Amino acid sequence: MSRLWIGTSWKMTKTLSEGRAWARGLVDHLATTHDGQAPAGVQPFVIPSFTATTTVAEILGEDSPVLLGVQNAHWEDAGAWTGEVSVPQAKDAGAQVVEIGHSERREHFGETVETTRLKVAAALRHGLTPLLCIGESAEVKEAGGSSAFILDQAAGALEGLSEEELSRVVIAYEPIWAIGEKGRPATVEELVEPLAALGEKYTGKVAGLLYGGSVNLENAADLLGIEHVTGLFVGRTAWKLEGYLELLAIAQAHAAA
Ligand code: PGA
């Protein structure tokens, strides 16, 4: 089995000193307990705010087992796009992963299937891993349309990719109703069908199929046990380093089982 991707986006949290403390703590933990490597069977990743990208890159150091990402990037390489950051700029700052299409960006910042498609292509063009987030609203779920909706979101964003390009994409299924303070943790039963729909189409073709949305220390092992799930994308629980380290340990145990 490929490695379990376990990562966090800090969203719009953490000062530089808080980010430094988290990243240093992670590096120290891996140095003392894992000989500076990733826990066996696990691919850690962290996605700070843009302002902390280079700081975290420096702390992780070259050849770190922890992948570094950005929470968004523009599809053009450069130009008059005030307020935006391009994929080449993100790469220059040390990023290897580009998060694309998180539901908060779709809801508040006009991200569409078309812009996610352009951004996935831009990330791939520059050799970065697109981490494509998809997920349905509570209304869509209640109407029974979860699987069709997320398959459409994925197909739209991944349209036209070659097999080789698709093999470099990571998909994160994050139902909107399960994300953040306003969300509620999903039950395993609720997730089996949408993940099966995604898995039937993408398992073996993409680099990973992650689950995200109110992942915590109580449900992480069960979520990793759902068929087709190859990792977890985590907000609040991982913002405290202790929570993230616990998740790494849970994933390592799962990988070893
Ligand atoms: P949460 O965030 O873990 O705090 O629910 C998940 C996400 O938005 O990826």
Image (tube, rainbow, N blue to C red):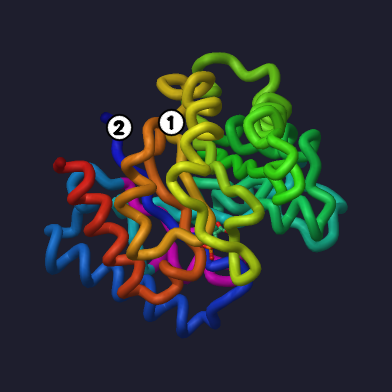
Q: Amino acid at mark 2?
A: Ser
Q: Are marks 2 and 1 in contact (CB under 8 Å)?
A: yes
In the image, 77: left or right of 109?
Answer: left
Q: Which residue occupies 57% across, 48% down? A: 174
Front-lying residue, 194 or 27: 194
Left-right relation of 140 to 225: right
Q: To which residue does mark 2 refer?
A: 2
The residue lying at 50 percent from left, 18 percent from top is 164
The image position of residue 111, as x and y in percent, is 79, 47
Q: Residue 232 at what x, y percent from top left?
A: 42, 50
Characterize the local packing of mark 2: few (<14), some (14-19) or many (20 or more) Cα atoms within 10 angstroms.
few
Q: Relative to 134, is 228 above or below?
A: above
- Disc 1 residue type (three-letter): Ala
For residue 121, say whether it is visible.
no
Instruction: Please tell me whether residue 45 belongs to the stretch shown in magenta.
Output: yes
Position above or below: 42 against 149 = below
Q: Secondary structure at mark 1?
A: loop
Foreground residue among 69 and 205: 205
The numbered mark at residue 207 is 1
Q: Residues within 10 Å of mark 1 (few under 14, many from 20)?
A: many
Rendering quadrant holding ligand 1:
bottom right
Residues drawn in magenta: 43-58
Instruction: Quadrant for the N terminus, please.
Output: top left
Q: Nearer the viewer, residue 155 or 122?
A: 155
One can see residue 12 in this view: yes
Q: Is residue 245 magenta?
A: no
